[in-house]
Amino acid sequence: MATKKIIAICQSWGEFETSKDGSMAYKGGEAYAMDLDQQTKLSDFKQELAETFHYSVDSMLIKYFLPANKKTLITISKEKDLKRMVNFFMDSDQVEVFVMTEEGVTPNVSNLPASRSSRTTESEAVVPAAVPVDMMMDLDGPVDMDTHIRIPLGGELAIIDGENDRRAVTQWEKTITGVDQRFRSFTEFREALHKYSIAHGFAYKFKKNDNRRVTAKCKSEGCPWRIYASRLATTQLVCIKKMSSTHTCEGASVKAGYRATRGWVGNIIKEKLKASPNYKPKDIASDIKREYGIQLNYTQAWRAKEIAREQLQGSYKEAYNQVPLLCEKIMETNPGSIATFATKEDSSFHRLFVSFHASIYGFQQGCRPLLFLDCTTLYSKYQGTLLAAMGVDGDDGVFPVAFAIVDADTEDNWHWFLVELKSAVSTSRPITFVADFQKGLRESLREIFENCHHAYCLRYLAEKLNRDLKGQFSHEARRLMVQDFYAAAYAPKLESFERCTENVKAISPEAYNWVIRSEPDHWANAFFGGARYNHMTSNFGELFYSWVFEATELPITQFVDVLRGKMMELIYTRRVDCSQWGTRLTPSMEEKLQNEISKSCSLQVLPTHGSTFEVRGESVDLVDIDHWDCSCRIWQHTGLPCCHAIAVFECLGRSPYDYCSRYFTAESYRLTYAESIHPVPNVERPLNIVLTEGELSVSVTPPPTRRPPGRPKMKQPGSVEIIKRQLQCSKCKGLGHNKRKCK
């Protein structure tokens, strides 16, 4: 049977325009049609597009909109992405695809842009059409006379690799043409003057610079070059009244240094920063040197990046003032959601809680009663901490349920978060929480959630064990103790737990006492009373924390919107994927069950009495099928029948699928992703809005905490090496030094 094809309308060389509601439309450019189906290879697709639009395959980006959503662009980077797009649009028979290069990505995919910074000038609207967008400057404010950068001597341009870059700088030579040239504002005139000086390789200084007139002269002593511009009478136009275009300095003035504002550099790199948020200062300096012949140091490049980022993302300070409106819009567009915030007595931001209706519904209807609590530091301008509660779907995938942004990681904030979380996931089911044991959560969980179970995160416990024993044992001894500690935690039965702890005791009685005193009933499978399905650590949601890592430096409103967009895409994608499943269980659980079925073939089953059976293999185990119980305890811990139980089902002619936890079925998985997260419109409050009494009258200011100086120590989430090797002297065998420093 022939595979159904869809038509891809591939567009390039145009630009995106964003409407007031945040939706985007692609204007201009050229289009090319291609047939796609499930057998189309991404490499062939990209090759044909590259040949059509004359792009390099390596630098080309391919994006598309989700169906019925013109606000979220999805990137195609691997084979699975292409197949998923074909699945999305199989019913519509046609999809719009946008092709661009990494240097020229223009759409802003954020649906919640904060207010534009006051540094963004009107020059963006009045720059001449011949000047590229990424070369606009911000010179509307006072001129910084103390910031210097260098350009080539003698007016020569730097050696530039690309012809386009040379042409971009060369065209600046004629931004100033002489007397009677007119500009629409002083900002536009200052921009033109700045570019003109770079193209001709000289430095200048202002003698007069206000909103009525601008006089500038060459910075070299004795050079006659000068220019004077003022407003044209009865108009708003600015006109050059006098200009001496002759230089006698021959570039000597450049030795004193060349002035350029951070805002000017920020405007140059703005578009590149939009395409590559991780654009490094050293790369910025290198690109500016290569393309414009201007030498920046690291600090200047870093500050220019900060200005460009604020122009793109909006003001960090204003974003906090938009939090009340953000909460209102979330609950308005996603009924049933919870979005609430709190401020301190001085109106400074304290905390924000968000849980979307789709997450609440999915957790209650399809997820097992298991929540992971964890936190991570945010590295925006005002720092803060993200608290998160994550569930796990039937395919063992992370399912974000709720998150909060708070000013600090404190017991009070955790207590508040749990109170809000209970209002979101109120359920009669006893919930198992996997969380750190040191955050004061134990008392709060016991107080807020009745009949809940608190499982200590095994990773945090192991790190504490390692810290407490550091300096007393060699690296190898500590590694073996932590290994035995993990084995004791996973041990399903008491005897295997005791065997593992005895191994710890053989190395160190002190370490054994530490393990016994650490409340094994909160972390060991042999004693734990709740159901955590063998999930032992709270840092379960690597996917979620990768989203946080990508958006951690954004203003608060945009940060929330990035998470919302990621969650929206995740729910939509998984809903489409599971619609094609033909198994009764989810794929990962189906695979685990089949592994147990294969192990059951060699087992011998002997009936004892009633529903209890004896199963013989490498060991002898008792299975009670009525109570879903096996003495190996794997069935109870995982929710899937063990090989012993499956052997009994084979003898009785029963299906093992009838004895799997309902949370592992494809039906429950579909319920988890049945509801959608809807787009949230822009939260920019209109200017001159008249608020009625009590309506959004809350003014929220940033928290007093500021990001400390220096580069933040940002590390990707995931597993961390628990045991770090200590120095060990090869001479005396002591720890903490080598033989060279041995006394």
Image: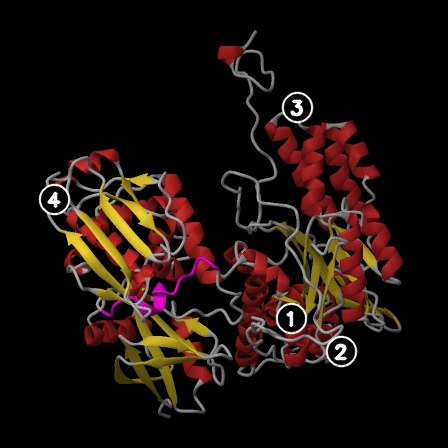
Q: Quadrant of residue 248?
A: top left
The Cα atoms of the two marked residues, 4 and 1, are separated by: 56 Å
Q: Does the rendering let one see residue 743?
A: yes
- Identify the element where label 2 is drawn: helix
Residue sticking out furthest to the front = 233
Q: Earlier in the sequence, mark 4 or mark 2?
A: 4
Please, which colouring scheme is shown? secondary structure
Instruction: State the CA–CA distance, disc 4 to disc 2.
Output: 101 Å
Which residues are drawn in magenta? Answer: 118-129
SS under mark 1 = helix
How many numbered marks are there?
4
> Residue 722 appears at what percent x and percent y?
61, 39
Among the two numbered marks 2 and 3 on one chain, the one whose residue lies closer to the N terminus: 3
**Which residue is under mark 2?**
652
How far is disc 1 from disc 3 in space, using C-alphas? 53 Å
Q: Which residue is labeled 4 in the image?
A: 247
Residue lying at 37% horizontally and 40% vertically, measured from the top left: 298
Question: How many residues crowd mark 2 within 10 Å: few (<14), some (14–19), many (20+)?
Answer: few
Mark found first going from the N terminus, 1 or 3: 1
Q: CA distance from mark 2 to mark 3?
A: 58 Å
Give the main secondary structure of the magenta stretch. Answer: loop
Which tag is nearer the camera, tag 4 or tag 3? Answer: 4
Q: Is residue 732 above or below residue 715?
A: above
Residue 141 shows which numbered tag?
none
**Picture quarter containing residue 41?**
bottom left
- Is 398 drawn above or below residue 374 in the view shown? below
- Residue topped by disc 3: 471
Marks 2 and 1 sit apart, C-alpha to C-alpha, by 61 Å
Amino acid bearing label 2: Leu
Mark 3 surroundings: few (<14), some (14-19) or many (≥20) residues within 10 A: some
